[in-house]
Image: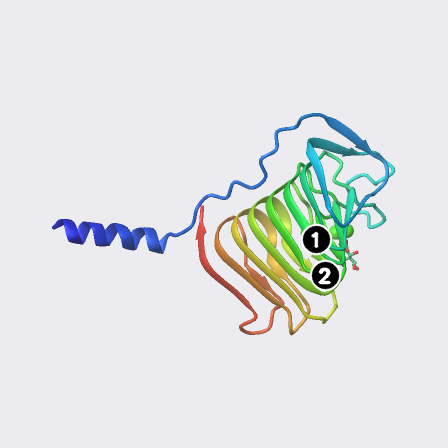
Amino acid sequence: MNMKYIVGAVALALASSATFAATGASCKSTGSVPVAETIKIDGGTYDGGCKTFNGTSALGDGSQGEAQKAYFRIMNGATLKNVIIGKNGADGIHSWYGGTLDNITWTDIGEDAFSVKKAGNVTLKNITGKAGEDKFIQQNAEGTITVTNCILDGAAKFYRQNGGKTFKTTINVSGCDISNLKEGVFRTDSPTSVASLKNSRIRNVPTICIGYAAGKCTSSGVTNF
Ligand code: DGU
Ligand code: CA
Ligand code: CA
């Protein structure tokens, strides 16, 4: 085999398996902070300093009970970064009118990990979620969700548009390692909603698209790991 052919074959092999391991969040805990009520961040940036935020029973118990509170509410374009959510996941983090999460770990996902409660676009980057029972991301209002470099290990669904709702939602996910889902990656009941999974890896994931209209949920560059 001549050199030219070998170089070509290697380039082809790289191109056809063009996925890389996601690294997710990177914090090592620097201490512990109790959280007894939702911390509201209205614009600007809140840096959690890689502390572990531990919800008290005032937030909830991390079960599937619907009456639980969020640890944080990001509002009006706020950024929340460098946070570890502790063992009581409660109702995770909420967004009102858009914002960004950067470098967030959910140690033990509660009722869900992140919810869009009021319409707005959100960016979720460098995030890691573990040990969920039901949903990782819940979208209850309009907007586009963009997720990059994430690890989710354990949930029923990576993403759910609120059941029975038909407004349009958009979720684009890339550079993620998603494993151990009971149902699938994306689920909607809306005929207009769209979803994409790109350049990511999956393991023990029964299906990617649930409930989407033809052509509205796509995947490319997705391999098993
Ligand atoms: O009837 O809408 O768990 O927003 C079900 C509810 C439920 C939501 C969801 C959420 O899907 O409350 O956290
Ligand atoms: Ca639930
Ligand atoms: Ca919830």
Q: In this figure, which colouring scheme has been used for the structure?
A: rainbow
Classify residue 168 as left or right of residue 17. Answer: right
The amino acid type found where label 2 is placed reads Gly
- Which residue is pictured at 72% across the width and 54% down the height? 77
- Which residue is pictured at 61% across the width and 33% down the height? 27
Pointer 1 with pointer 2, Cβ within 8 A: yes
Eyeballing the image, is 2 above or below 162?
Answer: above
Q: Residues within 10 Å of mark 1 (few under 14, many from 20)?
A: many
Q: Quadrant of residue 69?
A: top right
Eyeballing the image, is 20 above or below 35?
Answer: below
Eyeballing the image, is 56 above or below 91?
Answer: above
The location of residue 111, given as percent across then percent down, is 75, 47
Residue nearest the observer in this picture, 78 or 218: 78
* Mark 1 Cβ inside 8 Å of ligand 3: no
* Mark 2 Cβ inside 8 Å of ligand 1: no
The location of residue 79, given as percent across then percent down, is 69, 47
Residue 120, numbered label: 2
Q: Quadrant of residue 141?
A: bottom right
Residue 131, numbered label: none
Which residue is tagged 1?
A: 99
The amino acid type found where label 1 is placed reads Gly
Instruction: Check disc 2 and report its element: helix, strand or loop.
Output: loop
- Which residue is pictured at 59% across the width and 49% down the height? 181
Question: Which quarter holds ligand 1?
Answer: bottom right
Most distant residue in the left direction: 2
Instruction: Check disc 1 and report its element: helix, strand or loop.
Output: strand
Classify residue 35 as left or right of residue 44. Answer: right
Residue nearest the observer in this picture, 81 or 53: 81
The location of residue 17, given as percent across then percent down, is 37, 52
Q: Residues within 10 Å of mark 2 (few under 14, many from 20)?
A: some
The location of residue 51, given as percent across then percent down, is 70, 30
